[in-house]
Image (cartoon, rainbow, N blue to C red):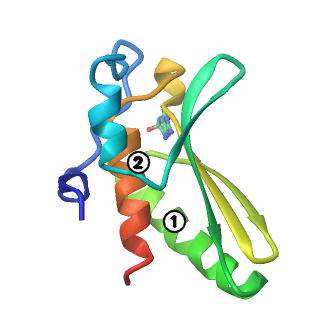
Amino acid sequence: MSELTAMKCEACRADAPKVSDEELPALMRQIPDWTPVVREGILQLERVYKFKNFKSAWAFHGKVAELAEAEGHHPALLLEWGKLTVTWWSHSIKGLHKNDFICAAKTDALLLE
Ligand SMILES: C[C@H](O)[C@H](O)[C@H]1CNC2=NC(N)=NC(=O)C2=N1
């Protein structure tokens, strides 16, 4: 389990630093099941979680929503039959912040609960 899961998100400020190109590879190695994607020019982290049915995906959706509220940092969630797509990025800086990696690692940890 990544050390990221022991960290806490900081408040999202418009002047907060984005994760740099130099920092990105080491952070991505800590969340190997996630993919960096660019949407509307914004770098984001995405993972698709597969489940046996809608109800299981829905239950995980609820856990991720609770995590988001606890961290004060919120993902995009696409709930489908047997799938939940989770996408993290920082709206305030239109890109990736350390918060997004912390939350991606904590999202993975929810699977172990
Ligand atoms: C006021 C509130 O805390 C801010 O709007 C928070 C809410 N959750 C957030 N979530 C994400 N992903 N990015 C943000 O910039 C953000 N800002």
Query: x, y percentage for residue 23?
Result: 27, 24
Residue 96: which disc?
none
Dot 2 surroundings within 10 Å: few (below 14), some, or many (20 or more)?
some
Q: Quadrant of the C terminus?
A: bottom left
Residue 72: which disc?
2
Query: x, y percentage for residue 44?
Result: 55, 34
Residue wearing tag 1: 64
Query: x, y percentage for residue 31?
Result: 37, 51
The vertical placement of 80 against 46, above or below, is below
Residue 18, by quadrant, is top left
The vertical placement of 97 against 82, above or below, is above
How many marks the image carries: the answer is: 2
Beta carbon of the mark 1 residue lies under 8 A of ligand 1: no
Dot 1 surroundings within 10 Å: few (below 14), some, or many (20 or more)?
many
**What residue type is disc 1 on?**
Val
Identity of the residue drawn at 72% across and 20% down? 40
Label 1: element kind: helix
Label 2: element kind: loop
The residue at the far right in this view is: 81
- Tag in front: 1 or 2: 1
Identity of the residue drawn at 33% across and 31% down? 25
Identity of the residue drawn at 20% across and 51% down? 7
**What residue type is disc 2 on?**
Gly
Alpha carbons under labels 1 and 2: distance apart: 12 Å
Residue 70, by quadrant, is bottom left
Q: Quadrant of the N terminus?
A: bottom left
The residue at the far top in this view is: 15
Query: x, y percentage for residue 105?
Result: 35, 56
Beta carbon of the mark 2 residue lies under 8 A of ligand 1: yes
Q: Earlier in the sequence, mark 1 or mark 2?
A: 1
